[in-house]
Amino acid sequence: MRHGVDFVIDHESHHRDRPVRVGELQVWDIVNGSPMSHPFHLHGFFFRVVEVNGKPPAFLSWEDTVDVPGRGRVRIAWLPDDRPGEWMYHCHILEHHAAGMMAHFEVVR
């Protein structure tokens, strides 16, 4: 708890997420339960935004960061390439990242 606000992912500071496999399509729903928007950043990989609050984006482009609106949901799709190892994603507001709004995951073959 920091200044009355929890900075968490899946109810946990510095979350350890499940591994993902090289070449296996990833479709993630990023849900923001807070009233403030948070820029979600995926290290080392690019993704396509599929939906924002249930609607398709105005255009498709490769991204590594997307704004997740307050009380909103963003669906992304991406493909882990052959670079196994530890990777992370986090809120790109650096104070939120430092306070725990981040996660690690492993890319495995």
Image (tube, helix red, strand yellow):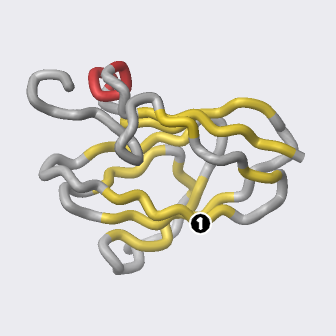
**Considering depth in this image, is 74 or 3 the residue closer to the camera?**
3
User: Which residue is at the front of the view, 95 or 1?
Assistant: 1
Give residue 91's quadrant in the image. Answer: top left
From the top left corner, tell me how far across and down residue 42 is, in percent: 54, 41
In the shown orientation, is residue 3 left or right of residue 39?
A: left
58, above or below 80, in the image: below
Question: In the image, is residue 24 above or below residue 41?
Answer: below
| Farthest residue, direction left | 4
Q: x, y percentage for residue 106? A: 72, 38
Q: Residue at x 53, y 62 (%)?
A: 28
The percent coordinates of residue 1 (x first, y second) are 20, 26
Q: Residue flagged by tag 1: what amino acid is it?
A: Val
* Residue for badge 1: 27
Please tell me in which quadrant of the rendered image residue 9 appears: top left
Give whichever of 84, 7 is nearer the camera.
7
Residue appearing at x 18%, y 50% in the figure: 34
Residue nearest the observer in this picture, 96 or 63 = 96
Q: Residue at x 83, y 38 (%)?
A: 83
Please, what secondary structure does the residue beneath circle 1 have? Answer: strand
In the image, taking residue 10 as reference, residue 81 lies left or right, namely: right
Instruction: Please state the horizontal and vertical placement of residue 67, each as a whole percent of the image.
Output: 33, 51
Please indicate whether residue 49 sits to the left or right of residue 72 in the image.
Answer: right
Please, is residue 47 above or below residue 27 in the view? above
